[in-house]
Image (cartoon, rainbow, N blue to C red):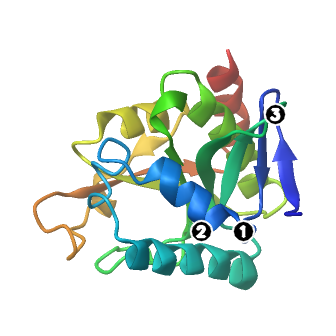
Amino acid sequence: MASTIVETGRLRLREWDNADEASFYAVMNTPAVMRHLGGVQTPDQWHAAYERLRGYQRDFGFTFWIVERLGDGELQGFCGLKRVNYDGAPNPGECEIGWRLRESAWGQGIAKEAAIATLDLAFGRFAEPSAVALTFDANGSSWGLMERLGMTYDPALDFVDPRFPDDIVKQWRMTAADWPAARAVALA
């Protein structure tokens, strides 16, 4: 059984287990979910991504964890932390928060709930001084959540990921010192 990282009012964030590779791929590898993430993945592409996620947990003590609904355990997606590791990023190694949710979980506050718990972990258990969130300019839903969390867009961190040369990767930042006040607003 995979270790639980944290529980919220509705969700459990936990480590990945072997069964998650196939179930996550089946639920999350849709055109809508993958629209801003390079498109639907082949099984080999997903397997490589899955191995990277497991490697982050092993190497850093955190990753983009599985998010499941309490009660029935339905997979909602992932949310968690990793180190910025994109070609061209001006801030390699900085703590990054990220999320990806299944379509049926959109618009229910699940990403926000999971992200608040994740930022609590970033600045509490993992004592990170700051965290960034990255998305493409076209992904307004994602950067809207970043702003609702109290993160601030930092244009100095914009870059072009060579895998997606037609769009700009933008970054929002939150510091540990700013999190308590931002958290109170996000919860209101």
**Front one among 142 and 159:** 142
Among numbered discs 1 and 3, the one appearing first in the sequence: 1
Relative image position of residue 148 (x, y in whole percent): 51, 28
Report if the CB atoms under discs 1 and 2 are less than 8 Å apart. yes
| Amino acid type shown at disc 2 | Lys
Horizontally, is 150 left or right of 137 in the view? right
Q: Which residue is mark 2?
A: 82
Q: Which residue sits at x=50%, y=77%?
A: 47
Horizontally, is 132 left or right of 137 in the view? right
What is the secondary structure assignment of the residue under circle 1? loop
Among numbered discs 3 and 2, the one appearing first in the sequence: 3
Q: Which residue is mark 1?
A: 62
Q: Which residue sits at x=34%, y=73%?
A: 89
Q: Residue furthest left?
A: 166
Q: Is residue 63 visible?
A: yes
Horizontally, is 73 left or right of 75 in the view? right
Report if the CB atoms under discs 3 and 2 are less than 8 Å apart. no
Note whether 13 is above or below 103 in the view shown.
below
Near mark 3 (Cα within 10 A), the count class, few <14, some 14-19 or many ≥20, is some
What is the secondary structure assignment of the residue under circle 3? loop
Q: Which residue sits at x=41%, y=54%?
A: 29
Q: Which residue sits at x=50%, y=59%?
A: 25
